[in-house]
Amino acid sequence: MGKTMSEKILARAAAVPEASAGDILWVNVDKAMMDDILGPRVEIAEKMAEIKDEVWDKEKVVVISDHYTPPANIKQAEIVKFTREWASNHGVDNYYEFIGPCHQIMAEYGHVRPGAVVLGTDSHTCMGGALGAFATGVGSTEMLGVLITGKTWLRVPETIKVEWTGKMAECIMAKDISLKTIGVIGHAGATYKAVEYTGDTITSLPIDERMAITNMAVEMGAKVGLMAPDGKVVEYLKQRGINDGYTLVNSDADAQYCKTYKFSATDLVPVVACPHEVDNVTEIMNVEGTSIHQAYLGSCTGGRYYDLVAAARILKGKKIARGIRLLVSPASHEIWRQAAADGTLAVLADAGAIVLAPSCGVCVGLHSGILADGEICISSTNRNFIGRMGSKNAGIYLGSPVTVAASAIAGKITDPRRFI
């Protein structure tokens, strides 16, 4: 019987001949990532001091301050300071701050590689599956064990196959694919499953777009979101100076899936997730005309270079509606510099956008543009829960970067195809 990507990767990590869905394995972790919000300050520092105040492998631990950067108050500043000092005191050289959301930084700096097991104290760690890694989020207690031993228990998940075929029309983006998939499967429909995205639509996507899809696998409850690594992944790694030290893992043709979903990209239209659930998905024409106060382009889901360029094409030569805030936060410092160098950020700024630092701040409602009572935001981020971006009395719609751009121009939720 053939094996899935998850079964193969976890078997290697556990040093066993083979693994099947349902097996519980003691696996070796290739990279362990902590952020500032759920990192050392959350019981990890205190408990490690009691047990063994050193990490098992300094090269395999990554610490990233991204949620509280730049700090908006003294408490946030103290947390970032504590995180920085903890990394320094424990000899963790892979420490980064003020340069973007952790998942993007993990990929850009070569910490996520095909065939690896990557664990992080953030649920959207599953974004690493776009590079063919078994990447998933864990809690601080689990991370404490990993830091000390370099190992953890994992149950091999069953795999749901999601097949997308056909060519996407203009103004349709990976975010539309992601939201459509989540709307059909539901917010708990893939709980502790691996979701494997396949089909010629997926293979045609650039890495930036693939990351937008695997990033949101957790919004279906999935343990991981996976895509078979191919030549585009190899090229992405080469651009970062990585030419070896990884394994391209693919599912076998006769691998067993617990469920299969098939979608046609040719028939896909722009969609949005309505307040207050990510699976509350509808075609954009059903909510078009809904007034907004803020539009947000950014985060580890919708702030990559491809996203900024796509939004700039819509906004070029236009102005956002009077009274509307368009906030833009590139997904990393590298992306910020690239978009600045080629004029993309200038196009966005000329349209009226406020360009922010690379950060998680707006997405998670910590700083840089939170919502007031009664305000409505259209966002390219990954969650629209009550209170996610500020007031519990605000509403968040999720859409693609071009939907965000079009809506900012109109001052209301708008089909981006109107600007073709």
Image (cartoon, rainbow, N blue to C red):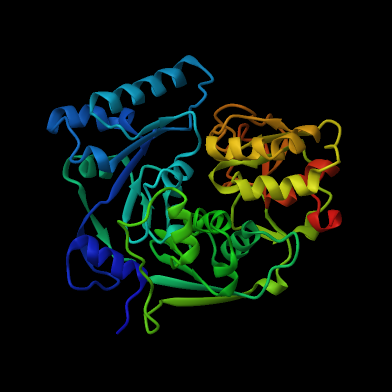
Q: Is residue 308 left or right of residue 85?
A: right
Q: Please tell me whether residue 351 is drawn above or below residue 170 in the rendered image.
A: above
Find residue 221 and report its horizontal and vertical position in percent. Answer: 45, 58
Q: Is residue 166 left or right of residue 56?
A: right
Q: Quadrant of residue 250?
A: bottom left
Find residue 60 and report its horizontal and vertical position in percent. Answer: 27, 43
Q: Is residue 183 left or right of residue 283?
A: left
Query: From where the camera sits, is residue 221 visible?
Result: no
Query: Could you say which is closer to the camera, residue 394 or residue 102?
Result: 102
Q: Spot the residue most to the top.
A: 74
Q: How many numbered circles does the render carry?
A: 0
Q: Please tell me whether residue 124 is drawn above or below residue 258 in the rendered image.
A: above
Q: Spot the residue most to the left.
A: 51
Find residue 191 and report its horizontal and vertical position in percent. Answer: 42, 61
Residue at 35%, 73% in the rendered image: 4
Query: From where the camera sits, is residue 345 visible?
Result: yes
Q: Please tell me whether residue 81 is drawn above or below residue 408 in the rendered image.
A: above
Q: Is residue 79 left or right of residue 374?
A: left
Quadrant in the picture for the C terminus: bottom right
Residue at 33%, 51% in the rendered image: 118
Find residue 42 and report its horizontal and vertical position in percent. Answer: 32, 31
Q: Please tell me whether residue 273 is drawn above or below residue 162 in the rendered image.
A: above
Q: Quadrant of residue 206?
A: bottom right
Q: Quadrant of residue 271?
A: bottom right
Query: Could you say which is closer to the camera, residue 215 or residue 378?
Result: 215
Residue at 54%, 38% in the rendered image: 334
Residue at 23%, 60% in the rendered image: 13
